[in-house]
Image: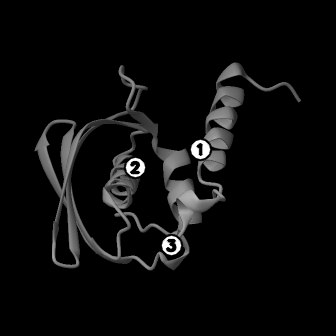
Amino acid sequence: MARSFGSMARAGVAAAALAACAPATGPEVAGRADFDPGYRGIETILLDGDLVNFRVAMTGARDKADVEAYARCAAAQYALIRGAGFARHVRTTVAQTGSIWRGDAVYTISAALPEGFRTIDAEVTVRDCGALGIPTV
């Protein structure tokens, strides 16, 4: 069966995303095996039209990248719930108070692939989040 360029491109993006999630080896990942996150909730705030704010909180984050991933998963699921297939990252701030990490992220949600470098395919991202055990909206 012939596959369209779009489906092959999506498959390539999915494969690249999953490859990026493969466990690394060597001394640079020492201590990473003890990752035991506590996902403490997602707050979604519609700012204006397709601009949405996601506030997340978690414990056990290794660094700000874990908090950013949690917010990205929330944005992807929200896009799917709203019938959109894509999101574009605008900004994320991360702060830690004691053992609680908080993320404040803004994304635009759209049906068509938005311009920019920090775009996500919502369906692929939600699937990857599930595989990684990161909850969504």
Disc 3 + disc 1, Cβ < 8 Å:
no
| Farthest residue, direction left | 47
**Residue type marked 3:** Gly
Q: Which residue is mark 3?
A: 31
Crowdedness of circle 2 by 10 Å Cα count: few (<14), some, many (20+)?
many
Instruction: Name the residue rendered at 50%, 49% in the picture.
Output: 125
Residue 96 in which image quadrant: bottom left
Q: Residue furthest front?
A: 27
Q: Earlier in the sequence, mark 3 or mark 1?
A: 1
Q: CA distance from mark 1 to mark 2?
A: 14 Å
Mark seen at residue 99: none
> What's under tag 2, amino acid-wise?
Ala
Q: Quadrant of the N terminus?
A: top right
- Residue 85 found in image quarter: top left
Q: Position of residue 2 (x, y in %)?
A: 85, 24
Q: Residues within 10 Å of mark 1 (few under 14, many from 20)?
A: some
Question: Badge 3: few (under 14), some or many (20 or more) residues near its Cα, within 10 Å?
Answer: few
Give the image location of residue 22, x and y in percent: 65, 55
Q: Is residue 24 left or right of residue 44?
A: right
Q: Secondary structure at mark 3?
A: loop
Q: Nearer the viewer, residue 39 or 27?
A: 27
Q: Nearer the viewer, mark 2 or mark 3?
A: 3
- 123 vs 59: above or below: above
Give the residue at x 66% y 47%.
19
Which badge, 2 or 3, is on the more N-terminal residue?
Answer: 3
3D distance between C-alphas at marks 2 and 3: 29 Å
Report the side of 59 relative to 124 (left or right): left
Tell me: 6 left or right of 43. Answer: right
Quickly name the residue at label 1. Answer: 17
- Specify the label residue 76 is tagged with: 2
Q: CA distance from mark 3 to mark 1?
A: 23 Å
Q: Position of residue 46 (x, y in %)?
A: 14, 48
